[in-house]
Image (cartoon, rainbow, N blue to C red):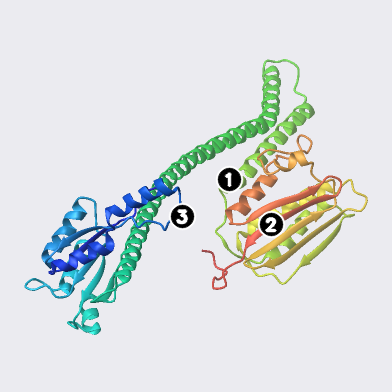
Amino acid sequence: MSAPITPNRRILVVDDNQAIHQDFRKILCPPPATAALDAMEAALFGDVAAAPVDAGFVVDSAYQGEEGVGLVKAALAQGKPYALAFVDIRMPPGIDGVETALRLWKEDEDLQVVLCSAYSDYSWEEMTQRLGISQRLLILRKPFDNIEVRQLAHALSEKWSLLRQSHKRMEDLKQEVQEWTRELAVANDRLRKEMEDRARLEARLVQAQRLEALGRLTAGLAHEINNPLSVIMASVGFLRSELDESAKGGRPVDASELSDVCADALIGAERILRIVNDFRLFSRLDGEPQKQVDLRDVLDHALSGASYNLGPRARVIRDFQDIPPVWGSEQGLEQVFLGLLNNAGYAIKEGAEPQVCISAHQREDWVMVEVRDNGVGIPPEHLGRIFDPFFTTKPPGTGTGLGLSICYGIISGLGGAIEVDSTPGKGSTFRVKLPRAPAESSSASV
């Protein structure tokens, strides 16, 4: 904050008549003897009430306009500006009062000016045409009244002080704004740096998550393949040992026993083939090009394919509204809904009144499909993992744990979303959100 503005009592009188200067001093500068007499009176008669003493003004004189401009310029350079200038209109042979006022304002724009004249040298229109209508200018006619001059001096010097305070306040506000701007710039730089750091950390986290997911996927794939591969290796090893023993002239080969061993090896090979096919589908290596798909046909085919797993006791409710075509892969979508319906059939096997409801409806530019069952539900601790590869709650050998992961991958690849709500003992609801096909597109592949 700037220091408060001290009252400015400095006045400049610009007039070519020396008597006018004396008159201004008599009016604006109180006799020094007055203060001495007041002090003597107080000493003799005690502290008596008295009118407040006018501290007076400091009056400087200039007898020509150019001289007055020089004094104003010098006062500004010394840091002691004038608050007010009384300027005569006529000052031959130099410049007149109007020109003097213009030059004074060029040096000090805050200077208050009173033009004094006994003659009608300028009309008001002519004066405002040259000087403009300014709050810094007043006109005083000669001969002037002493009280009027004193009032003008007090009022205009106070006005000058208020104007300077306003300037100081504006400077303070500018400094505050600049400081706030600097602080804001520093805060913005810090925020930008934090955002960049966070983006880098998020990128590293995503990479770490990908590596973690790849590790889990690799471990799961190795585990799932290892069991049937062990069966195959054991079966092939047994076959080889039996054939080698027979070739050496040992005991004859038991064809039925070898057939059972071969059957075990084929079961293991078929399981490995199923895992590989599911994994290829999970990776979308065999994905079809996207096109317009009639979702009702897809849902009908999925229901037909899942009828065996749903069982004859299950009550199947269909609610297919007038839905538009979706944008996706017909084979992939059929795989998704077949997988969801098969899971529903597995969940309702223990129920007294098994029921599965599949519905589809349009919502703005999306088509929503729900598969709802009243089966055993999903425990809360499993909800966050059901879309993870190789995660399954089924007994060993009954599933690969890739079904829901495949569904999630296919739907995400089509630009949709899949989510689930489930309550143990009351059933589960899977919601699939699919993008609506563009109206101008054709059924041809793109």
Question: Which residue type carries mark 2?
Answer: Val
Question: Which residue type carries mark 3?
Answer: Ala
Q: Please state which of residues 285 and 154 is positioned toward the viewer in this rendering.
A: 154
Does residue 213 appear in this view? yes
Q: Vertically, is 279 above or below 61?
A: above
Q: Kindly identify the residue that appears in the image at 14 percent across and 66 percent down.
A: 18
For disc 3, the neighbor class at 10 Å (few under 14, some 14 to 19, many from 20) is few
For disc 1, the neighbor class at 10 Å (few under 14, some 14 to 19, many from 20) is some
Task: Please say if the residues under marks 3 and 2 sit with CB atoms less than 8 Å apart.
Answer: no
Where residue 377 appears, as percent x and y from the top left, is 82, 46
Residue 381: quadrant of the picture = top right
Q: Vertically, is 310 above or below 17?
A: above
Q: Please state which of residues 258 and 104 is positioned toward the viewer in this rendering.
A: 104
Q: Please name the residue that numbered disc 1 is placed on.
A: 283
How many angstroms separate mark 1 from mark 2 (CA)?
Answer: 20 Å
User: Which mark is first along the chain, 1 or 3?
Assistant: 3
Mark sitting on residue 432: 2
Q: Please state which of residues 257 and 380 is positioned toward the viewer in this rendering.
A: 380
Q: Kindly identify the residue that appears in the image at 92 percent across and 53 percent down.
A: 353
Q: Please name the residue that numbered disc 3 is placed on.
A: 49
